[in-house]
Amino acid sequence: MFVKVSRWEIRKSTIDAGNSTPDISKIPASTRRRLNAFGKTAGSLISEMIDDQPLIVFASRYGDVERSVSILEQISNSEDLSPMHFSLSVHNAVSGLLSIAWKINEMQSVISAGENSLVMGLTEAFALIEAFPEKQILFVYLDAPLPDLFSEFDELDAVLDVGAILLSHNDCSDVGVSLEVSQVTDFPSNKTNSLALIENVLSGVEERAIIGTGSFGWEFKKHAA
């Protein structure tokens, strides 16, 4: 299949470092007050890509783990749970809160598929392009390493990237980069999955990239439209 990428924003994750300063000026103040670093990072990634009411695919392995750990700590200390932390800890909370803030009325898919969350999120995005060729699809991937308390269970790469990619059917726009996307089954089993691999193709650094699970993957090549 051929897809058009009209905008993208991919960066190294600093969610866990506590010193990230994303641009959150376009998030309404009433919403900013409810967001932590995870939510603010998501908002800063997509704030410039929502003008045309895209369908949204939000993929994350752990979601807003900071809130989840906070809730577990409150339970272990026999403290009352924070209603805000509880309501915002569910996997679709951040994308839902941002869509309400920006009055996005289109459907959303929220993907959590373990170590395959990136690949399965992309799979959902491509399926939506086929099902709704007239619509733009905003793919968002966001994760951070687990906190030290759970570090022994963390299987994420030491260096993470987060990002958003605005996709559409190749015939829908003359603006952007055209990619040929193919499903493949032959790729290195130890290959690192990273949005930066796709960015390398979009920017012309690499000719192709493959992102895969244990059973299948997606190959990306720049297409001369």
Image (spheres, rainbow, N blue to C red):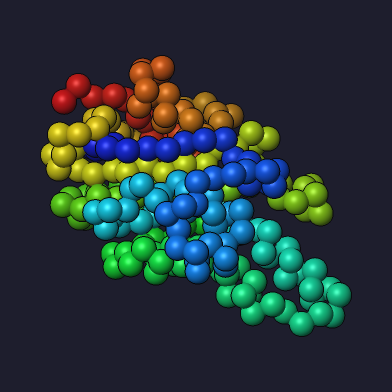
161 sits to left or right of 202: right
Total numbered labels: 0
Q: Is residue 183 above or below residue 72?
A: above
Q: Is residue 198 above or below residue 43?
A: above
Which residue shows up at 81% across the image and 54% down it? 149
Which residue shows up at 27% across the image and 53% down it? 51
47 sits to left or right of 54: right
Q: Is residue 140 above or below residue 36?
A: above
Task: Look at the image and tell me in which quarter the N terminus lies.
Answer: top left
Task: Look at the image and tell me in which quarter the C terminus lies.
Answer: top left
Query: In the rendered image, which quarter is residue 218 located in?
Result: top left
143 sits to left or right of 18: left
Residue 161 can be seen in this image: yes
Point out residue 34 in the picture as x, y percentages from the top left corner. 57, 67
Point out residue 166 in the picture as x, y percentages from the top left corner. 32, 44
Point out residue 2 in the picture as x, y percentages from the top left corner. 22, 35
Residue 113 can be seen in this image: no
The foreground one among 204 and 175 is 175
Point out residue 79 in the picture as x, y percentages from the top left corner. 81, 80
Which residue shows up at 76% across the image and 82% down it? 80
The foreground one among 114 and 86 is 86
Q: Is residue 201 above or below residue 159?
A: above
Which residue is outermost to the right? 77
123 sits to left or right of 215: left
Which residue shows up at 79% across the image and 73% down it? 74
